[in-house]
Image: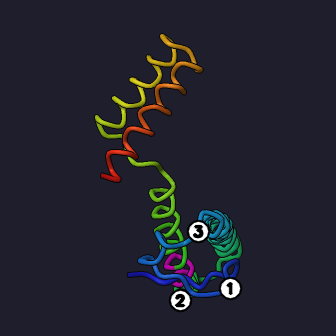
């Protein structure tokens, strides 16, 4: 389990609590992570180029911390991406989608609404029995 101190959410976030965040919180947090990833990657490149150009020894402690934060940020961003993706539809869901679409094409919107309303009324009366 990883933890990330989010400045945009103004609190630490655990990977286990990502599914409980609101869509807005996920978007804000994801944007923060992407900015962090881009910034760290740029800094690593710039520092490496500077060290090579000027003959300085790499600061391995700083590089370790930067790469660790980069790795954690990427883990969080990846988890958020999987949360935002809709789950694949089951056979029953796909069947219902196609069934309704075909009925709509064949009957028209007015007739389909009337049938759906009648089915809803019957279902309600049966569930009250």
Q: CA distance from mark 1 to mark 2?
A: 27 Å
**In the image shown, does 119 or 63 lie closer to the viewer?**
119
The disc label shown at residue 10, or none: 1
- The structure residue drawn at horizontal position 50% and vertical position 13%, both measured from the top left corner, is 107
Main secondary structure along the magenta-highlighted residues: helix
User: Which residue appears farthest toward the front when viewing the image?
Assistant: 129
Q: CA distance from mark 1 to mark 3?
A: 15 Å
**In the image shown, does 77 or 21 lie closer to the viewer?**
21
- The structure residue drawn at horizontal position 44% and vertical position 39%, both measured from the top left corner, is 120
Question: Where does residue 79 sit, x and y in percent of width and height?
Answer: 45, 64
- Circle 2 SS class: helix
- Circle 3 SS class: loop
Q: Would you place residue 24 above or below residue 6 in this image? A: above
Q: Earlier in the sequence, mark 1 or mark 2?
A: 1
Task: Single out the mark in the foreground, 1 or 2.
Answer: 1
Q: Residues within 10 Å of mark 1 (few under 14, many from 20)?
A: few
Q: Would you place residue 71 above or below residue 95 in this image? A: below
Question: Where does residue 13 sit, x and y in percent of width and height?
Answer: 53, 82
Does the CB distance between marks 2 and 3 fall below 8 Å?
Answer: no
- Circle 1 SS class: loop
Q: Is residue 66 magenta?
A: yes
The image quadrant of residue 113 is top right
Q: Earlier in the sequence, mark 2 or mark 3?
A: 3
Q: Which residue is mark 3?
A: 22
Q: Residues within 10 Å of mark 3 (few under 14, many from 20)?
A: few
Q: Would you place residue 31 above or below residue 92 in this image? A: below
- The structure residue drawn at horizontal position 31% and vertical position 40%, both measured from the top left corner, is 90
Magenta stretch in the rendered image: 63-68
Q: Which residue is mark 2?
A: 61
Task: Single out the mark in the foreground, 2 or 3.
Answer: 3
């Amino acid at each position: 389990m990883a933890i990330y101190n989010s400045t945009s959410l103004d609190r630490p976030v655990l990977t286990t609590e990502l599914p409980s965040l609101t869509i807005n919180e996920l978007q804000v947090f994801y944007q923060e992570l992407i900015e962090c990833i881009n910034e760290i990657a740029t800094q690593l490149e710039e520092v490496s180029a500077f060290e090579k150009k000027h003959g300085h020894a790499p600061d391995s402690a700083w590089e370790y911390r930067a790469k660790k934060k980069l790795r954690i940020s990427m883990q969080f961003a990846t988890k958020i991406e999987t949360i935002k993706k809709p789950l694949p539809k089951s056979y029953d869901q796909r069947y219902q989608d196609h069934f309704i679409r075909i009925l709509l094409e064949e009957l028209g919107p007015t007739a389909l609404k009337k049938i759906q309303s009648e089915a809803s009324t019957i279902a309600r009366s049966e569930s009250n029995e």
